[in-house]
Amino acid sequence: MSERDEKNPQEESSATTTTTWPDIEEELIIPEVLHSEGVKKLHMSIQSEWDYLQKSACQTAAGRALWKHVIHDPLAHLFAGETHLRNLHTKIKNDLLNNAREVSGVILAVRTLWFDTRIQAALDSFQTDATTQVVLLGAGMDARSYRLNCLNKSDVFEVDFADVLEAKTSLVQAAVKSSDELRMKAKSLVRVAIDIRDSDWFDKLKKSGFLPEINTVWVLEGILYYLSHTEAMQVLNLIADKCALTSTVLLADFMNKPSATLPNSVFHFYSDWPDQLLPSLGFSQVSLSQIGDPDANFGLLHDPLNLFNKLLRLPRSAQIHPDDGTPCCRLYLVEAFGSPPQILP
Ligand SMILES: C[S@@+](CC[C@H](N)C(=O)[O-])C[C@H]1O[C@@H](n2cnc3c(N)ncnc32)[C@H](O)[C@@H]1O
């Protein structure tokens, strides 16, 4: 069901390799640094003072920490904290014991690997040795600046709430103190405390050193659906407008309506057809993948009867599964390009 026309050979091979779980009992590692007084105190305040939105940053890190057999993230355990690590570990253990078709955290693992792959491809697409920019909106506990070599010519901007970024900086300092192995892979990294619901968020980003005329990759991973429809559209429109100034790649995940409107949902914005929405805003070459597609699989979803593979066999317009009446919850992984208008001679 992928709408990407061309597959690169790496993507094809990742789809055919099956990844199996190592011994799950050995997967729960609580690194020594999490026991240090300062870090323990910091994580206790995260647990007691942060709201669900901010805590989602640590939950995501826990996913990367426990899927470490496929994601190599040197900071994920420290960023996640013991509570989130133990919670997810228990869920994964139960899933494996029950031979579940989908193991908890698999969406996060696939999403992370898809964004990693597409960030690298986006940077390659600029075909330049000049400095590029990568903006992580709602960066949370993303550690790409410390784990992706392809960022070595990029100025990275991590945008999130002040509390999240302050905690992140303290945790990185603790990691540096406890080990000399942590290395920055990005050319530079700036953390920018911004609420992207504010109308002046782009001005604040510029004040922190972001240059609108430099080739830019925008990474909107796990963020859009926390915004209202109006807020999400403002963010997307603003990024689309900036494409007039430079080559731009937008990478974003979108929930469809059934995903965002489940009972007790904390999500708001959704789009059933982001591949139609983004061209209407001015983006071109929009390609859409779903979890389980050949380029969004990474050998982690081999059971043809798992939820994701079953959904791939249904038309995207289906909102209710015809077999069991359950909502067709989909996560779309979308890549879109933008560039200044060509001036014809
Ligand atoms: C699910 S986490 C995803 C974090 C990261 N992108 C990742 O994939 O690991 C969502 C992040 O978005 C941040 N966030 C949510 N709403 C935001 C807003 N209005 N402005 C800035 N950051 C926001 C949260 O604080 C949180 O860190």
Image (cartoon, rainbow, N blue to C red):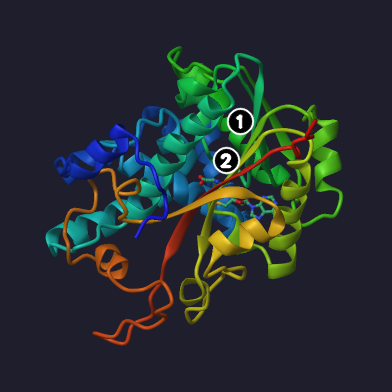
Residue located at (41% from left, 43% from top)? 114
- From where the camera sits, is residue 82 visible? no
Q: Position of residue 228 (x, y in %)?
A: 69, 68
**What residue is drawn where x is 61% and y is 48%?**
284
Relative to 206, say whether 110 is above or below. below
Residue lying farthest to the front in this orientation:
345
- Rounded to the nearest angstrom, the CA distance separating label 2 from label 1 is 9 Å
According to the picture, the residue beneath numbered tag 1 turns out to be: 170
**Looking at the image, residue 338 lies above or below residue 153:** below
Mark 1, secondary structure of its residue? helix
- Image spot of residue 324 (x, y percent): 26, 86
Left or right of residue 40, residue 294 in this image: left
- Which labelled disc corresponds to residue 242? none
Report the quarter where the N terminus lies: bottom left
The amino acid pointed to by label 1 is Ser
On the image, numbered disc 2 is attached to which residue?
42
**Residue 203 appears left or right of 177:** right
Q: Secondary structure at mark 2?
A: helix
Mark 2 CB within 8 Å of ligand 1 = no
Q: Quadrant of residue 151?
A: top right
> What amino acid type is highlighted by mark number 2?
Leu
**In the rendered view, would you say 49 is above or below 8?**
below
